[in-house]
Amino acid sequence: MTESQQQANNLDSWLDSYAARAQTLAVSEVRALFSVVSRPEVVSLAGGMPYVAALPQELLQQTYESMMAKRGALAMQYGSGQGDLVLRDQIRDLMALEGISSSVEDIVITTGSQHGLDLLSGLFLDNGDVVLAEGPSYVGALGIFNHYEAHVEHVYTDDAGISPEALSEAIDRMKAQGRTIKFLYLVTNFANPSGVTLSAERRPRILEICKREHILVVEDNPYGLLYFDQPVPDALRSMDEDGVVYLGSFSKILVPGFRVGYVLAPPAIRDKLVLANESAILCPTSFGQMMISEYLATADWKGQIDTFRGVYRERRDAALAAMHEYLPKLETTRPDGGFYLWVTLPDGIDSKAMLPLAVKELVAYTPGTAFYGDGTGHNKLRVCYSYPTPENINVGIKRLANVINLQTELLETFAKKGK
């Protein structure tokens, strides 16, 4: 036994008993920031938290009272492993806004869309299987794929989303290596972390490639209704019912605390998802489902989503204005919805190494390395503008600029001395 193993055993007497996949568990770079960014003096541009204060508390109180009067006894009890039938029917109306026609029988309620992705990964991924994903990609998804010991192959992504040509090349490369590709994972609209949206022109091309290669598409869409000017193109699922599994969530368009998401899947996959759901949690939260169902039935939920759009548009504009004022030379995406800016740093600056210096200046962000399974992305960082006020966004980016500009000056100084 090595010295490091001995030290680990001293901390955990069950170390030798864990399954091999338990060794893949690690705190994500986003979660690791939470203890720091919770300090009130730190402006957090890190965690992707929605601005729940924009949802009137009295509206939730009225929803609660109405729900308890109508369905209180059911809300306190176990429910179906597939989820509440009334809510599933309402979700059909929600998905129809993005062109999706579905049967209530093909929807499975989950504990947030993250849970849905975990269930899918458990059904499909064996050790060494390949998941194709955007580069960069959602950190929570990467954690799941890593836990199931999959290989994530990032595919080049630009301002129009994932590249069809790069996707074909990645598929050929993986096949040449004898690897098994299980699915393509995409956040199609206002992606986390890049903020980009897969263009309408590329959507059918991506589906055509995957259909030809018999690769399942997993479409994760928590932000699609949070557009600022124009609705997003129709969902991939609306174009291919058999080849696409669709993940949705109420966390961004209502509140995350209810932990209610949903999966729309082809019948055979749906059946396995229900069984997996029952095995994992017996049933999703009845209380949370029925609260959301009552909210959808009685509130002006479309008007509330409009309110959220205005809130996040104002914050997006504040973030872009501050970037233009304090960091005008940096390349930054300009999202048309959602929560995030994706920033490219000057050559030689490492966003992960710079983070402690930023926290010392009372601002936090998420390093780009969090969003790549292969450890790249050192010269990238994510700015989340959804939660801070516009004033604090300005303050935070000004502080961030001070750190970046100092690092740039140091690099230039040492470069001159080295000549």
Image (cartoon, grey):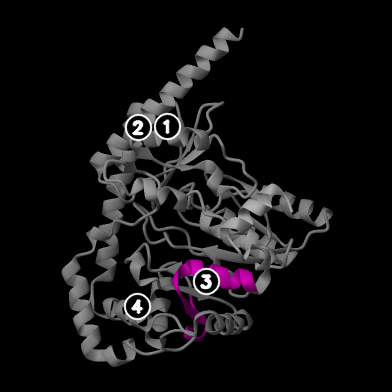
| Left-right relation of 10 to 324 | right
Q: Measure how far apart labels 3 and 1 are at the Cα level.
A: 37 Å
Q: Measure how far apart labels 2 and 3 are at the Cα level.
A: 38 Å
Q: Measure how far apart labels 1 and 4 are at the Cα level.
A: 40 Å
Disc 2 target residue: 361
Q: Where in the figure is residue 81, as x and y percent of width and height? A: 49, 86
Q: Are marks 3 and 1 in contact (CB under 8 Å)?
A: no
Amino acid type at circle 3 is Gly
Q: Where in the figure is residue 386, as x and y percent of width and height? A: 33, 50
Q: Where in the figure is residue 59, as x and y percent of width and height? A: 19, 71
Question: What secondary structure is marked by label 4?
Answer: helix
Magenta span contains residue 104: yes
Magenta stretch, main secondary structure class: helix
Q: Are marks 2 and 1 in contact (CB under 8 Å)?
A: yes
Disc 4 target residue: 288
- Figure check: 91 above or below 326: below
| The N terminus lies in quadrant | bottom right
Q: Earlier in the sequence, mark 2 or mark 3?
A: 3
What residue range appears in magenta?
101-122
Question: What secondary structure is marked by label 1?
Answer: helix
Residue drawn 33% across the image and 57% down it: 50
Can residue 29 be seen here? The reply is yes
Magenta span contains residue 255: no
Q: Measure how far apart labels 2 and 1 are at the Cα level.
A: 6 Å
| Left-right relation of 371 to 67 | right
Disc 3 target residue: 116
- Say which mark, if any, is on residue 357: 1
The local crowd at label 1, few if under 14, some if 14 to 19, many if 20 or more residues have their Cα within 10 Å, is some
The local crowd at label 3, few if under 14, some if 14 to 19, many if 20 or more residues have their Cα within 10 Å, is many
Amino acid type at circle 1 is Leu
